[in-house]
């Protein structure tokens, strides 16, 4: 019930957080799964910042970075990667950003 994916109501975010707290009291696995579901629901409702926070809490910063990058929030993804990931994981984030910049540069050259 707390993870209901109906259109957001005033207490929607609080209900998701309550579900996460309750799940944490059950087991670590239940907590991880519940937080993932809550984050996906937040993404569906365009609450990217809140979803990123939840994903980061459970060690899924690389997934959070992908969502940020899909929203063209490349600098936010780079900052999150630098602050919360090891070198090889953050290198993937920066690699995707460099590919994006190169593709953009090629597009600009074609338009000139």
Image: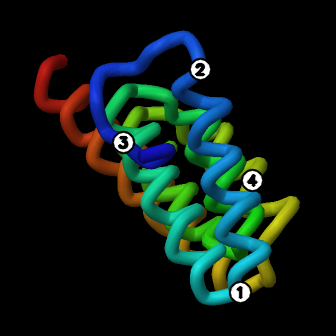
Q: Nearer the viewer, mark 4 or mark 2?
A: 2
Q: Can the viewer see residue 58?
A: yes
Q: Which mark is residue 11?
A: 2
Task: Report the quarter where the C terminus lies.
Answer: top left
Q: Which mark is residue 4?
A: 3
Q: Position of residue 64 (x, y in %)?
A: 56, 57
Which image quadrant is residue 105 in?
top left
Residue at image location 71% in from the left, 75% down from the top = 59
Helix, strand or loop for disc 3: loop
User: Are the residues flagged by discs 2 and 1 in contact, CB closer than 8 Å?
Assistant: no
- Compare marks 3 and 1 and give the one earlier in the sequence: 3
Q: Nearer the viewer, mark 3 or mark 4?
A: 3
Can you identify the residue that label 1 sits on?
28
* Cα distance between the residues tagged 2 and 1: 25 Å
- Would you call the spot at circle 1 few (<14 residues within 10 Å), some (14-19), or many (20 or more)? few
63 and 106: which is toward the camera: 63
């Amino acid at each position: 019930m707390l993870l209901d994916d109906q259109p957001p109501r005033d207490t929607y975010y609080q209900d998701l957080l309550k579900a996460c707290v309750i799940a944490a009291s059950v087991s670590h696995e239940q907590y991880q799964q519940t937080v993932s579901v809550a984050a996906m629901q937040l993404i569906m409702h365009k609450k990217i910042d809140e979803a990123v926070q939840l994903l980061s809490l459970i060690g899924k910063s690389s997934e959070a970075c992908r969502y940020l990058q899909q929203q063209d929030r490349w600098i936010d993804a780079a900052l999150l990667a630098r602050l919360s990931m090891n070198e090889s994981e953050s290198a993937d984030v920066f690699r995707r950003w460099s590919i994006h910049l190169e593709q953009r540069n090629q597009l600009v050259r074609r338009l000139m």
